Image (cartoon, rainbow, N blue to C red):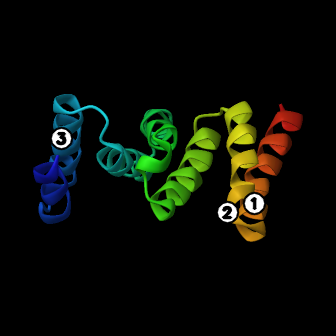
């Protein structure tokens, strides 16, 4: 997985980055940093449902993930859950956001409010 992470940061072509990360995950399970990078990449590409799968794996890894990465994975997971139209998951993740302080929790609450608005508009 070190090679995959190195290739992620050095290769210029975005498709190569995604392939390198998928290959690393296929070879070695339990690599939350690689899962984080793949989830982040998929989120950035607008593949919110796919990103959420990888970001949830990062969050499930618990203390194996540094707090800063876990916080960012949570932020991306909330946004990905919203983008994938999974408002129940947005609410679940937003409850965890209180762990990271008032400002972070308030920002997560904004995504919950968006869900509520979307649900009433349907």
Residue depth check, mark 3 versus mark 2: number of the one nearer the observer: 2
* Vertical position of residue 38 compared to residue 71: above or below: above
Figure disc tally? 3
Of label 3 and label 2, which has the lower sequence position? 3
Above or below 103: residue 18: above
Check residue 19 in the rendering and tell me which mark sits there, or answer none.
Answer: 3
Which quadrant of the view contains residue 98?
Answer: bottom right
Residue ID at (10%, 52%): 3
Left or right relative to 28: residue 71: right
Along the horizontal axis of the image, is 54 left or right of 2? right
Q: Position of residue 102 (x, y in %)?
A: 78, 68
Contact? badges 3 and 1 (CB < 8 Å): no
Mark 2 residue crowding within 10 angstroms, few (<14) / some (14–19) / many (20+): few
The x, y position of residue 5, in whole percent, is 19, 55
Circles 1 and 2, Cβ within 8 Å, touching? The answer is yes
Q: Earlier in the sequence, mark 3 or mark 1?
A: 3
Write the residue at 89% across / 36% down.
120
* Residue at the image position 27 percent from the left and 31 percent from the top: 29
Q: In the displayed image of the protein, which residue is found farthest to the bottom?
A: 103
Query: Whole-Å distance between the Cαs marked 3 and 1?
Result: 34 Å
Position of residue 57 measured from the top left corner of the image (x, y, whole percent): 45, 36
Q: Which residue is mark 2?
A: 100
């Amino acid at each position: 997985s070190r090679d995959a992470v190195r290739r992620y940061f050095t290769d210029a072509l975005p498709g190569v980055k995604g392939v390198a990360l998928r290959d690393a995950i296929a070879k070695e399970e339990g690599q939350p940093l690689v899962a984080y990078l793949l989830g982040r990449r998929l989120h950035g590409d607008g593949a919110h449902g796919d990103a959420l799968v990888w970001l949830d794996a990062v969050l499930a890894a618990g203390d194996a993930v540094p707090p800063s990465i876990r916080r960012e994975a949570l932020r991306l997971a909330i946004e990905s859950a919203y983008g994938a139209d999974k408002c129940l998951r947005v609410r679940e993740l937003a409850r965890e956001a209180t762990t990271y302080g008032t400002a972070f929790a308030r920002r997560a609450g904004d995504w919950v409010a968006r869900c509520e608005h979307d649900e009433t508009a349907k």
